[in-house]
Image (cartoon, rainbow, N blue to C red):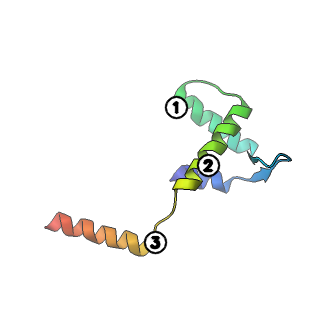
Amino acid sequence: MWIIEKYYALETTRSSNHNSMLSKEAVKEFKAIWRKQFGEDISDEKAAEEGINLLTILDAIYRPIKKEWADELEQKDNEQKQG
């Protein structure tokens, strides 16, 4: 998932109230994505809030699978296609 890699690669800092903050570059990019998807402009604050919310959700649900599990799944798929 490109968005996970993209935003986890960007710098994050901790503010004095302990909320994660996205870099200015990440906020700018998130605003561009939002504009493209929803056709509206949002403030930097709203973009940072929504970006952090997205990362929080993705962090909770996204877990890479083991290579051996992926290999087993691929093998099962191949077997189903053949049989």
Q: Which residue is at a point 64% across and 25% down the rendered structure image? A: 41
| Residue at the right extreme of this rendering | 16
Q: Quadrant of residue 74?
A: bottom left
Q: Amino acid at mark 3?
A: Lys
**Closer to the camera in the image, 20 or 17:** 17
Q: Which mark is residue 16?
A: none
For label 1, count other residues whose C-alpha is less than 10 Å away and answer few (under 14), some (14-19) or many (20+): few
Q: CA–CA distance between discs 2 and 1?
A: 17 Å
| Quadrant including the C terminus | bottom left
Q: Is residue 14 left or right of residue 28?
A: right
The residue at which mark 2 appears reads as 55
Q: CA–CA distance between discs 2 and 3?
A: 22 Å
Query: Label 2's element?
Result: helix
Q: Amino acid at mark 2?
A: Leu
For label 2, count other residues whose C-alpha is less than 10 Å away and answer few (under 14), some (14-19) or many (20+): some
Q: Quadrant of residue 48?
A: top right
